[in-house]
Amino acid sequence: MEIADLTHQELHQALQTHFGFDHFKDRQENIIQSLLRGKDTFVVMPTGGGKSLCYQLPALIMQGTALIISPLIALMKNQVDAIRGYNDEDSVAHFLNSSLSKTQARKVKEDIRAGKTKLLYVAPETLTKEENIQFFKSVQVSFVAVDEAHCISEWGHDFRPEYRKIREMVEAFEQEVPIIALTATATPKVSSDIKKNLKIEDAKEYTSSFNRENLYYEVRPKKNKDQAIREIVQIVQSMDGESGIVYVQSRKMTEEIAKALKVNGVKASPYHAGLEGKTRSRIQDQFLMEDIDVICATIAFGMGIDKPDVRFVIHYNMPKSIENYYQETGRAGRDGLGGRCVSFYSHADVLKLEKFLRDKPVAERELGAQLLDDVIAYAETGGCRRKYLLHYFGEQFDAENCEKMCDNCKHPKEKQDVTDDLGLAIRAVLELQENYTIKTLVNFLRGDISQKQVSLGLDKKELYNQGAEHSETYWYSILRQATVHGFLHKEIEEYGKLSVTPKGNSQLQTPEPFEIPINHDFEKMIQENDARGPSKGTALDPTLLNMLEDLLERESKRKELPPFVIFQEASLNDMATQYPTSMSDMERITGVNKGKARRFARPFIDLITEYVEENDIDTPEDFVVKQVANKSKIKVEIIKGTDRKIPLEDIGSANKLNFEELLQEMYMIVLSGTKLNIDYYIEENVDEYAKEEIYDYFLEAETDSIDAAFQELQDDDVTLEEIQLVRIKFLSDLGN
């Protein structure tokens, strides 16, 4: 019987024989049948959907050797080992890449010639070598599988130029070879680009739903490193020994977060390209064998790693694209059980990513900026995160079906009727001839365009400045939600220009009510120290928090001190979560040490004790995020250095901190109640007039926010650095 004529029963028998599975997932069977019939096939299937089986089973059934093109040499061994685990002979699968010696490469080719090898994993670079092309001409190639096919597209998040040569190499084999291209993350534009480049425009296409129903999506504001690490430790400890991944952009932070987790009793390890290959392999194996529970990794980790029971994925930094985010969160819950995906978002991280783009070629820079804008839109949206993700990949979804599986649906913001302003936004797109991006449209509506745009006459348009009474956040909310709901279309090939759809034109003719939640303004939330607490195990008590805020206001007036000198908002939040009823309890609260507790805490302890007793509240078990010893050592060295009146630059250098990092550490020291005398440095480096202006400002201020202070004092020719220095002195003088 011909392979192409395998019946449903025979294919299921092959699945059972080769892999021990009783049934196919989703559309795997249709995809495999297409390939067995010699058809070019295009597959878009989310992480965890079973893409690998779509080429592994046909390869084992068909005559010849299948070439599996994979982008990462480091992961080929894992993929080969996985196949060998289902077979008696290691020769069934090999990889051929630059890591092999000549003897090893010769052995691989001998096994292929002998008909023993059914799958050969290769990097695209391997195919470009003439000796390999000649070799593949001489053997039977059953088909070519292009894994991670999004690498072909310049519009994708992981473009690799060598991938665009694959078709040329395959044609050099001088064989009629079907191609199957597979990816987990492809927008409609990327899909089109893949098929065009591989010359498989007529391929049978199989696109599975991008909806991962078992994943819970959440985005939290990141005020600073310490707050984020503390929350990461809380999240991980609440998961009770489950497996998880923390994604970080820098190698240094993978090690710092892993160290913080280990200090707090979590089996964690860093993973990044700076580690030796043997070390990385050992860490992968330990993670798979559950000797390590949590991997703190840069983005390469997880590709090709078949661990179905990852229960959570945390992003310390937001990724560079929605594709990256979707692929990395997709490591969670591959077994179909629950997965929690928490990301930390800050404007500072976005600025760093934008800075990385500055040195790129213009086209790459503009595409990178567009991808980053989509990440910002996802993070800031007040609407259903699942709906936003699926819309990005061209899939329609009703937010009512989210089942509270994202933070915005679980804790919905109140919706506003923006019907009239939606009409204004659509008319603005038309008035600007559908030729501008969302950023320009927001600025146009608010009357805040660039000089170049003024020279183009945009300020003379009828709708210019018509939305000035509303904030940027408001207009971004409307324009982004208008895109998600199909009133506007984002032109990918035109770097994000907005155009009006037929639905948008219909809305102008006969307006339908349109209500949306306004985006999260994380910068404002951070300034107000209103970051959310942990979502499991402990929960902030809003009633107690209101009582504590009232007490703080009374104590502030009684002691004639600004409220933030006594306790920061983060400290009150922690009190309303942990219910400290003794001095020792209070010393464990964020931003409170023994000195601050003794000076200010007694009225707060009394109030909390009375509240707990009156409401019969069971206080949570003590939860302390222990500091990494080295961190505590740095604080001690800073205190010693200032006591000895050593220049701050020298203190920073001795502790491997830049000046900005040193000032942040000093701020945290005085905030928690320890005195630091830096008068010696301020006298030499800060003008007396500036010092008095800043000091007087903080005496009257409601917050110790640097940004708020700078906005108020910038006309007095005061620098941010001067404000930071005097703030440290102010808090040390009055709060400690």
Image (cartoon, rainbow, N blue to C red):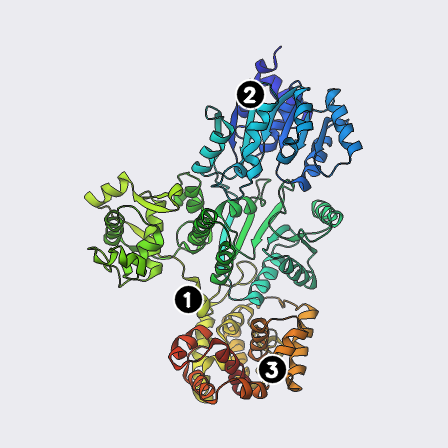
Number of residues whose C-alpha sits closer than 10 Å to that of mark 3, classed few (under 14), some (14–19) or many (20 or more): many
Quarter containing the C terminus: bottom right
Circle 3 SS class:
loop
Q: Is residue 90 visible?
A: no
Mark 3 and mark 1: span between their CA atoms? Answer: 28 Å
In the rendering, at what x and y percent does residue 512 appear? 24, 46
Residue at x 56%, y 86% (from the top left corner): 599
Instruction: Please tell me which residue lies in front, 77 or 579.
Output: 77
**Which residue type carries mark 3?**
Thr
Give the mark, 2 or 3, whose residue is nearer the N terminus: 2
Labelled disc at residue 64 = none
Mark 1 and mark 2: span between their CA atoms? Answer: 54 Å
- Give the number of marks: 3
Give the mark, 3 or 1, whose residue is nearer the N terminus: 1
State the image quarter where residue 621 is shown: bottom right
The residue labelled by disc 2 is: 33
In the rendering, at what x and y percent does residue 615 appear? 49, 70
Labelled disc at residue 524 = 1
Number of residues whose C-alpha sits closer than 10 Å to that of mark 2, classed few (under 14), some (14–19) or many (20 or more): many
Residue at x 31%, y 58% (from the top left corner): 452
Quarter containing the N terminus: top right
Mark 2 and mark 3: span between their CA atoms? Answer: 70 Å
Q: Is residue 364 visible?
A: yes
Instruction: Please tell me which residue lies in front, 517 or 361.
Output: 361
Labelled disc at residue 674 = 3
Circle 2 SS class:
helix
Decide: marks 1, 2 in contact (CB < 8 A)?
A: no
Give the mark, 1 or 2, whose residue is nearer the N terminus: 2
**Which residue type carries mark 2?**
Gln
**Which residue type carries mark 1?**
Lys
In the rendering, at what x and y percent does residue 17 appear? 68, 23
